[in-house]
Amino acid sequence: MCGIVAAVAERNVVPVLIEGLKRLEYRGYDSAGLALLNPTLTRLRSVGRVAELETQAKDQVAHHGIAHTRWATHGVPSERNAHPHVSGDLAVVHNGIIENYAELKAELIAAGFGFTSDTDTEVIAHLIRRTLHEVPDLTAAVQTAVTRLTGAYAIAVIREWEDRIVVARHGAPLLLGVAADGVYAASDAAALLQVTRQMIYLEDGDVAELTRGGVKIVGAGGTPVERPGVESALSADAVELGSYAHYMQKEIFEQPQALAATLELIGGAQTLSPNLFGAAAPELFDGVEAVLILACGTSFHAGLVARYWIEQLAGIPVSVEIASEYRYRASVPNPRQLVVAISQSGETADTLASVRHARNQGMPRTLALCNVPESAIVRECALRFLTRAGPEIGVASTKAFTTQLAALFLLALTLAKQAGRLAPPEEALYLASLRHLPVAVQKVLALAPSIAAWAPRFADKQHAIFLGRGLHYPIALEGALKLKEISYIHAEGYPAGELKHGPLALVDKEMPVVSIAPNDALLEKLKSNLKEVAARGGEMYVFADADSSVTEESGVHVLRLPEHYGLLSPVLHVVPLQLLAYQVALVKGTDVDKPRNLAKSVTVE
Ligand code: F6R
């Protein structure tokens, strides 16, 4: 989603702004722009890639600048809608959505302000300039102006002849980077690692004034506040592509390390303690009688797998809700319910709002399961488990998903133990099985060449069906999501038993049907479902286990995963589906890491 970089420093900040924008490209965007002070404003904007903006900016030198990648919300992707937006002598970049923008716009038009874009951001620029008539100090004017905004925002503002940049945030990410030669701001630490590791995370409602000499922050209450500095643990290599062709490919192949790093959190323990989820976990897990999982997209699919695990192992009822639906539904709150928010980014607006909604409904037992340490969802929840997948740059989530599954399995074991349903030998066996996952995933990755050979047969198709049963039904959903988001082939995931209740009507020789066929209790039932497909001439692609009795025959192609993995089998079975989507996208020549219309971190509703 939109990305912000801002800099005030002794050095020429133009290369820092451009490099910062490149580091934020993965978030998804359609246009880019920057504004520099010299000491008057220069604004450059372009539709398309940051590289184009870089060419435009190559001869520019400045010590103050704000830059932006835009993911269109209000108004089409175009140069006139690209940020920064200017009002007189000031310029603004913005991430988020201003919900009362129409009302503010009408008010500003009545006051004589003219608009040149369709964005909600231009409203912020005019609002600040109008406020400056009564409150002449820029920082104070921003503080006053933002009190009129409803919605989510992170903004950065510069004004001609001013030796400062003013930033503010509410509901959208923004952090500061403090270096010896100046102060920087960005939506994401990855953009600032080029200049510093010393970060300050702003809180909702903060307004900060950045100068070459340092930072002054004013909190939501209007009084000066100190926010702690943190040294970013992010390694610069973690965001390098290295020898891979795409981030998605790199991230699929990094899954063994990502799982191993996440499982390091339990070390060599033979038994789990609730403290793994935070110091307050023993108290907050005590007496939990239900679990509510809130998430979106791929993280929602991880939650669906967790439902099977928690219900089977801990005997606790679980509901899994799409965050954007839950927050607007009149649900029945249960104060003894553990609310689990799953989010790779920790910034997904719907998931964040759903957790707040749950808490407002009287459910204070909240647990964040995230991949980004200082993210909003982590800070919102009473408990946390941080996966250690490392930065995920490809828009399509892969290693974040498998590490979420590992974390959710740990949660299921912990709740099972608390419920007195997990004997020590069984617990030790499950933990050993978890620790073997990195090796098991590595073996599955060896199937990549065989999967690549299947890919051309999908590339010319318009649709595909993914089938799974039980624990692997959510994996079918995830396989379909991966294929549609990066190859633009319409795909649907179904529980295989549901086929004859409707989707079978779609099956003909043009419809590839991908099936997940692990050697579990449902295999024989799944085989009957496959026969239903075969009888209609459908072409089947089956991911079986080494010992699944599914045989290759005309119209039935089979690839075998090296070992059967019991309850943890979904962690292995999703990997070939990620590879399949990746390979099909390669054949189709789509933009694998930045699929059209999508953003990595969905910070708007
Ligand atoms: C799909 C994908 C998205 C995200 C969803 C939630 O590959 O990445 O569906 O899973 O936008 O994002 P997070 O997990 O950051 O809350």
Image (cartoon, helix red, strand yellow):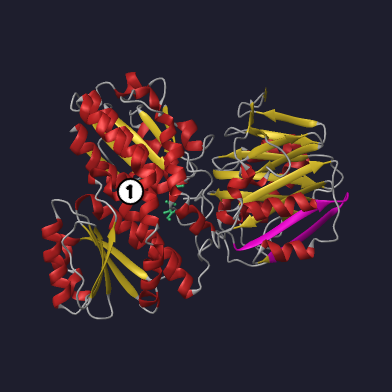
Image point 37% across, 61% down: which residue? 447
Image point 64% across, 44% down: which residue? 236
Give the magenta part as a residue range.
30-46
Image point 28% across, 44% down: which residue? 568
Q: Which residue is mark 1?
A: 571
Kind of element beneath mark 1: helix
Magenta segment: does it hold 218? no
Identified by mark 1, the residue type is: Val
Q: Name the spot of residue 531 as percent of width and height, x first.
A: 13, 70
Residue 301 visible here = yes
Q: Name the spot of residue 563 as percent of width and height, x first.
A: 27, 51
Residue 124 visible here = no
Residue 237 to residue 361: above or below: below
Is 512 on the left or on the right of 17, as rendered? left
* Between 564 and 377, the one nearer to me in the picture: 564
Overall secondary structure of the magenta section: strand
Which of the 4 image quadrants contains residue 45?
bottom right
Image point 43% across, 68% down: which residue? 583
Magenta segment: does it hold 44? yes
